Image (spheres, helix red, strand yellow):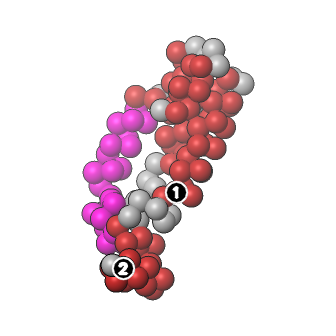
């Protein structure tokens, strides 16, 4: 959505806004959510930077005339489908991914021991 908003702010057409949004969503589709210790900190904060850069890059591409082959409405539908099919462990449950690595578990234990 940030890519579409940036495109709009910078004078893009409705079609360019759709292309920017579609490209940005496609770039991050399937990204798991695996917060260490169940906190939206590691790796989330650094992933937010990637999301911001992605939004700016996709807005720039759309404004330069690059188009998404898949229309934005179909990308949004597909993203919903991917999210529903994704295993529960990768949907902000802290039950998979980086959250269950040895260091991830150490961080969780340290957080639980804090007063």
Q: How many marks?
A: 2
Front in this rendered view, residue 37 or 98 = 37
Q: Position of residue 105 (x, y in %)?
A: 40, 82
The answer, for residue 101, to whether it is visible in the render is no
Could you tell whether 58 is left or right of 86 in the image?
right
Q: Nearer the viewer, mark 2 or mark 1?
A: 2
**Quarter-wise, where is residue 92 in the image?**
bottom left
Question: Crowdedness of circle 2 by 10 Å Cα count: few (<14), some, many (20+)?
Answer: few
**Which residues make up the magenta segment?**
74-96
Relative vertical location of residue 32 with respect to residue 70 in this rendering, above or below = below
**Which mark is drawn over residue 45?**
1
**Quarter-wise, where is residue 108 in the image?**
bottom left
Q: Position of residue 107 (x, y in %)?
A: 44, 79
Secondary structure under tag 2 reads loop
Secondary structure under tag 1 reads helix
Relative vertical location of residue 84 with respect to residue 24 in this rendering, above or below = below
**Residue occupying the point 48% across, 32% down:** 1
| Magenta stretch, overall SS | helix
Tell which residue pokes out farthest to the right in this image.
64
The answer, for residue 8, to whether it is visible in the render is yes
* Residue 94 falls within the magenta-colored stretch: yes
The quarter of the rendered structure image containing the C terminus is bottom left
**Quarter-wise, where is residue 90 in the image?**
bottom left
Relative vertical location of residue 19 with respect to residue 52 in this rendering, above or below = above
Front in this rendered view, residue 38 or 6 = 38
Q: Mark 2 = which residue?
A: 114
Front in this rendered view, residue 45 or 1 = 45
**Which mark is drawn over residue 56?**
none
* Residue 66 falls within the magenta-colored stretch: no
**Residue occupying the point 33% across, 50% down:** 83
Q: Position of residue 43 (x, y in %)?
A: 50, 64
């Amino acid at each position: 959505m940030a890519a579409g908003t940036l495109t709009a702010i910078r004078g893009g057409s409705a079609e360019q806004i759709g292309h920017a949004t579609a490209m940005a969503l496609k770039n991050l589709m399937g990204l798991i959510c695996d917060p260490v210790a169940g906190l939206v900190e590691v790796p989330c904060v650094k992933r937010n930077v990637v999301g911001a850069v992605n939004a700016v890059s996709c807005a720039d591409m759309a404004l330069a005339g690059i188009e998404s082959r898949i229309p934005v409405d179909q990308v949004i539908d597909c993203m919903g489908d991917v999210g529903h099919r994704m295993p529960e462990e990768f949907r902000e449950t802290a039950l998979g991914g980086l959250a269950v690595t040895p260091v991830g578990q150490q961080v969780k234990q340290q957080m639980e021991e804090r007063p």
